[in-house]
Amino acid sequence: MSANIDEGPQDGPDRIGPEHSPKRSFSQHVSHIVKAFTTREGLIGQYDYGFLFKPNLPFMKKSKQRAPFFGLQDRMPVVLAFLLGFQHALAMLAGVITPPIIISGAANFSTDTMQYLVSTSLIVCGILSAVQITRFHIWKTPYYVGTGLVSVVGTSFAIIPIATKGLAQMYENGMCPTSPAGVKLPCPQGYGAILGTCSLCALLEIGLSFMSPKMLKRLFPPIVTGPTVMLIGVHLVETGLKGWAGGSGSCLGRPTTGNFQLCPSNSAPHALPWGSAEFIGLGFSVFVTIILCERFGSPIMKSLSVVLGLLVGCIIAGATGYFDKSTIDAAPAASFIWVHTFPLSVYGPLILPLMAVYLILMMEAIGDISATCDVSRLQVEGRLFDSRIQGGVLADGLNGMLAGLCTITPMSTFAQNNGVIALTRCANRKAGYAACFFLIVMGVFSKFAAALTAIPAPVLGGMTTFLFASVAVSGLRIVATVPFTRRTRFILTAALALGMGAILVPDWFQYVFTYKGDNKAKAGFLDAIVLVMETGFAVAAFIAVMLNLILPPEDVAEETESLAGDLVEREEEEEREYKKDGSVESGVAPTGSGGASLKV
């Protein structure tokens, strides 16, 4: 159910920002908190908790009663707020931990550093999600920071292709160290360069947040963002499948000598050659569990299907001896931000690709915030809605900068939590704050992060392949909103031609430039061009933006001509159906014979 500007009863004024109702006094706040935690109504309420856990089995009678809807500022029981907040946190978990694990592998970090990055990712996501949910008014300006909705943020998937390609380039040009035997060593300098460049490029999104949402949508319409997001998912599926088959490290090529003849290494428990049937089956256990949860699961199971699939895969892996608990035993009891630090710097070749990433994150934020308003039964147009978009995009840019300073790659607004809101019928900010609390707790207790990083690659691969494919489907959904005229088909074809080509043949631009001189500025500029041209979604984004700006709008005659073939085919199909059903004999004329026809 959506609301427009005239019917948004749930969209009341924010507590932080312009005041339209009197503030509570301090004593009233204390009294309200005491009542919430000391009375049955405040703790448990009248909510039907069985609704969340009732599975959808064929032989079970479906209840026609729907759970009550909790709006943005409605009162809700404390237990329910914590339960739904925990559900939000678990729904985010897989997406939050995946980028630091993949990027740590690309930088060849030790297990200790990987555990730190996973812990810090959880902590930073919890803190920065609270910024989006709270919504601060910037003093003496009409601008805000945050949406005031249950808009949670997580580590962005869009940075993964850029970071992995950038680190590979750094190993090639000597910025990252390698051993005399050619083995890649840990590269904290390279990771620090990614963080520093991300923090710098976040200024682009921060600056664009002060433009009107209408202007942003005009510059970056769905015909630009749709194929870009789709190609990000398509590129990432490759990483997921490599992990599913055993890992994307040195064992990938099935070497015949050395310590990586087996995955993840020869000394690992239950090590097998890359692509072994056991690895494939282990990943399938995760994939099939996700499907079963979607088909037969209760509302809470459907929103946690990816996490439950991961849990089932871990149980099977543990029972069959794939886990190595030594890293869990060696992990510290607690962790926090800046336990490990990295030397910040700016890596020139990453600037152009990261600017494309932040443009994508901005448009994703606009779409996700619009969807959150819709499922939260709030206004989806008007000044209040525009201010939520502005505040959300500004917070998204600031979160990207702050994340880099907190040793984590950029954050983005997570869309999957809109599904949690729709399933549980709860758009209350208390549930959002509870999710932030659980994320921070999960990150602080680093044994939890150590257990996550110890998950075998095939189990993670079965989960991440599904996640990354959902990113591609999100892009496809955006493309589906575009009317297919001659102009839009041309833009889409041109963007996907080079975008998909760069994904399928990733080194196609590797040998264009042959410069080997000592001019580091020139070499860095050429590396930037190569990095952009070999990153499929970046190429697609630049081509789509350029063509959308230079190609004239299609006039009515051209648009009619481009659709004429489809309309004629549709009329012929309807006529055949009518004849088949005997409608013509009964005196009912088919659409294509008696009505107005389209002539070309």
Image (cartoon, rainbow, N blue to C red):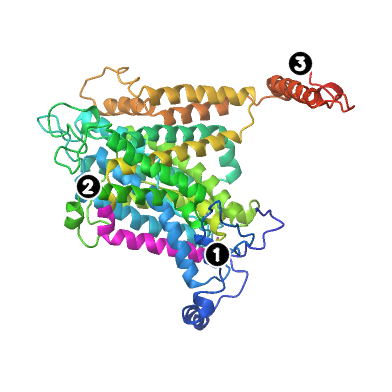
The answer to whether residue 18 is left or right of residue 120 is right
Give the x, y percent position of residue 247: 27, 36
Which one is nearer the viewer's eye here, 302 or 440? 302
Q: Is residue 442 magenta?
A: yes
Nearest to N terminus: mark 2 or mark 3: 2
Q: Which element is circle 2 on?
A: loop
Q: How many marks?
A: 3
Res. 287 image quadrant:
top left
Q: Would you say residue 138 is visible in this rendering? A: no
Separation (CA) of disc 1 from disc 3: 57 Å
Q: Is residue 211 magenta?
A: no
Which one is nearer the viewer's eye here, 288 or 178? 288
Residue 600: mark in rendering: 3
Nearest to N terminus: mark 1 or mark 3: 1
What secondary structure characterizes most of the magenta part?
helix
Residue where numbered disc 1 is placed: 17
Nearest to N terminus: mark 2 or mark 1: 1
Highlighted range, magenta: 427-451
Separation (CA) of disc 2 from disc 1: 55 Å
